[in-house]
Amino acid sequence: MPSIGEHQHIVRSYDNELQRLLDGVARMAGLAESQLAGAIQAMVERDGELAMRVAGGDDEVDNLDHAINDMTVRLLALRAPVADDLRLALTTLKISSELERVADHAKNAAKRTLVLNQMPPVPSVRAVARMGWLVLELLKEVMDAYLARDADRAEAVWRRDQEVDDLHSSLFRELLTYMMEDARNITPCTHLLFIAKNIERIGDHATNIAELTHFLVRGRSLTGERPKRDTTSEAIPEAPPGG
C-alpha cells in the first residue's frame, strides 16, 4: 500500500484523507494497467470474449475517478493544504484524470479488436503488441515512481517516450506498405493503425504522469523539450472507436 511518507500531521484524520487519495489512485492505476494488458492480449490471441470484457469494463475506473475528484475537492475545501500537501492533492487529481483516459484508450483498442477479429490475421499485430507491452511497462514504472515519490525514475520514463514514438512511426510505415501491396489489407490495417494510435496516446499519458511526479517531488516542472519525433499524429485523426 502506498504511504504518504514520514511527515505526519497533528490531526490524524488529515493523514487518513491523504492516504485514501493515494490508495484510490493506486487502485485506479492497477485497473487501468489491467485494461491495457487485456486489450493487448485480446488482440494477439483474437479473443473476442476478452475484448468485450475490456470494452465494457471501465466503469470501475470511472467511478474511482469521480471518487478521487470528490475527495480532493473536499480536502481542498476543508483542509486548505499548502506546500507538499497541496502538490500531492493537485497531482493526484490530475493523475486520476490521466488514468481515466488510459482506460478509455484501452477500451477503444478493444472495440477495434472486436472488428479486427472478423477479418483474416494481419502480420503487424505482433508489432502493435510489442509497442503495447512497452507502453504498459512504462505506465507501471511511472506509477511506481509516483507512489514512491521518485523523481529520477519518473524522469527516466519521461525520456523513454521516444522509444514509443519510434515504434509507432515504424509501424505506421509498415502498415502503409501492406495496404499498398494488397487492397484487401486496407480495412484490417486501418483498424490496427487506430489501435496503435490508442496505445501511443497511453504512452503520452504515462509521460504526463512522469511530469506530474517530478513536480510533486521537486516542486518544479521538468525543463527542456519532451523527447518526441513521431510525425504520424496528423496522419491518423482521432476517430470514434470501432468506426
Image (tube, rainbow, N blue to C red):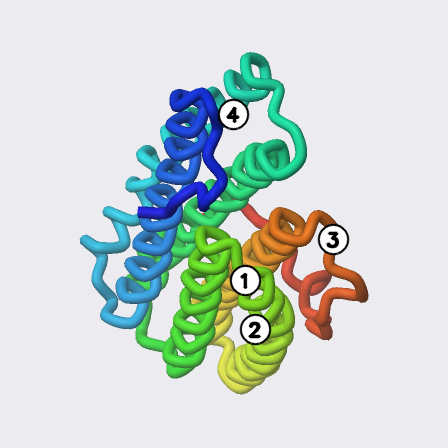
Name the residue: 50% across, 71% down: 186
Q: Is residue 106 above or below residue 230?
A: above
| Kind of residue indicated by mark 2 | Val
Mark pair 4, 2: CA separation: 32 Å
- Mark 3 vs mark 1: give the one in front: 3
Mark on residue 72?
A: 4
| Kind of residue indicated by mark 4 | Thr
| Kind of residue indicated by mark 1 | Gly
Please report whichever mark, 2 or 1, sits nearer to the chain's N-terminal start: 2
Mark on residue 164?
A: 2
Q: Is residue 51 above or below residue 196?
A: above
Picture coordinates of residue 215, whole percent (x, y):
67, 50
Label 1 with label 4: CB-CB less than 8 Å: no
Q: Nearer the viewer, residue 15 or 152?
A: 15
Q: Nearer the viewer, residue 68 or 189?
A: 68
Mark 4, secondary structure of its residue: helix
Please report whichever mark, 3 or 2, sits nearer to the chain's N-terminal start: 2
- Local crowd size for mark 4, using a 10 Å CA cut-off: few (<14), some (14–19), many (≥20): many
State how many labels appear: 4
Please report whichever mark, 1 or 4, sits nearer to the chain's N-terminal start: 4
- Local crowd size for mark 1, using a 10 Å CA cut-off: few (<14), some (14–19), many (≥20): many
Residue where numbered disc 3 is placed? 221
Label 2 with label 1: CB-CB less than 8 Å: yes
Please report whichever mark, 4 or 2, sits nearer to the chain's N-terminal start: 4
Label 3 with label 1: CB-CB less than 8 Å: no
Q: Nearer the viewer, residue 39 or 243?
A: 39
Mark pair 1, 4: CA separation: 26 Å
- Mark 1 vs mark 4: give the one in front: 4
Name the residue: 59% across, 67% down: 152
